[in-house]
Image: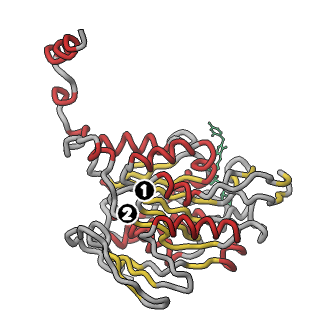
Amino acid sequence: MPSENVLGLSRNDYKGRKSTLCPGCGHDSISNQIISMAFDLGLEQHNLLKMSGIGCSSKTPAYFLGRSHGFNALHGRMPSVVTGALMANRELKAVAVSGDGDTGSIGMGQFKHVIRRNIPFVYIIENNGVYGLTKGQFSATADEGQELKYYGRNDLPAIDLALEAIIAGATFVARSFSGDAKQVQSLLQAAIRHKGIAVIDIISPCVTFNNSELSTKSYPYGKENEIPLHEIQVVAPDYVEAKEEITIGDYDAGEIIDVDMHDGTLVRLKKLGRDHDPRNRLQALTVLEEAQREELFLTGLIYYEEPRPTLAEAENLVPTGLVKLPAEALRPSADQLADVMASFR
Ligand SMILES: Cc1ncc(C[n+]2csc(CCOP(=O)(O)OP(=O)(O)O)c2C)c(N)n1
Ligand code: SF4
């Protein structure tokens, strides 16, 4: 691995403060992959936002990208704050971290609407099936029937956040496991280049409150049961003109195909036993439904399509970020306001 990237920076330059999470927490592995992704791609930290809500997972932005801008929003409210920040300055790239409690419980409404609005950022859910920070209560993604020593039995059905993301209109939806560093890295590299919202649900075991092998969010379960839908590998880091349409022919199990992303990135897919085409929405919903029923743990790029217009594009905003517009361009003059008022009379 080269010790310096294209900006002449070392991997250490992309680190943050020392983690205060429990040793072995899956969230720390994900932070390491975010650091590697930013280092490998030579991302400029002054153009990066790291955002989060509240929770152990949401504490992690303190531990990576120490030279970028960061903000811990209220519990479950990170999507609104990212929306505001990226509408104000459209030149920024944002990586946001949330927990399954932060997203799937208190923040579910915000999750659905930020996807529907297509705010272009990487939305990482560090999913451990419990509220880690507040000592292990069941979250909305906890398995039905799961028993925990202090909280008893969970009798409610689990919410699948990848399924919810596709239904809400996300154009990049992936699932991974924090212990699978290579796959997390590939998905992050593809996601940061996506021109719409990219949702990555990463099973990230809470080793303190939810690491029984009976939980589908534990290390033992993840290691034993991970079934990659395909291999995803980003192989073209430099910018190439976007392609208008993605078309590929049929391909066999075991064969590798390259899928051009909107910005020239190439995603390399290898079909395994399961014939999964991530550009087929119905198939993506079906494999997730089946997986939920059979307690299968599918990982990889589950759904991908050409990004639809972002909120700023849909609203026909000027390309200049609001932050760079002078006050007179942002506010109507007294005369203009008087005309508008007169038009309502
Ligand atoms: C409005 C509000 N309600 C409740 C809390 C208490 N609280 C803090 S973190 C948290 C859950 C965190 O769980 P999750 O998002 O799954 O993250 P983890 O700690 O497991 O990484 C809760 C309920 C809060 N901070 N604010
Ligand atoms: S309580 Fe769980 S989620 Fe929080 S730091 Fe410890 S292992 Fe990680």
Residue 240 image-quadrant placement:
bottom left
Image side of residue 70 versus residue 220, left or right: left
Q: Secondary structure at mark 2?
A: helix
Q: Label 2 near label 1: C-beta < 8 Å?
A: yes
Q: Residue at x 36, y 53 (%)?
A: 120
Dot 1 beta carbon under 8 Å from ligand 1: no
Q: Report the residue that reaches farthest toward the top.
A: 345
Ligand 1 is within 8 Å of the C-beta of the residue at disc 2: no
**Residue located beneath label 1 in the image:** 95
CA distance for labels 1 and 2? 8 Å
Please name the residue shown 26% across and 72% down the image. Answer: 264
Instruction: Name the residue beneath numbered marker 2.
Output: 192
| 28 displayed left or right of 49 | right
Q: In the image, what residue occupies the spot 40% across and 55% down?
A: 197
Task: Note whether residue 180 is visible.
Answer: yes
The spot of residue 99 in percent (x, y) is: 59, 53
Which badge, 1 or 2, comes first in the chain's sequence? 1
**Image spot of residue 44 (x, y percent):** 30, 60
The residue at the point 54 percent across, 39 percent down is 74
* Residue 62 in sight here: no
Q: Name the quarter where the N terminus is drawn.
A: bottom left
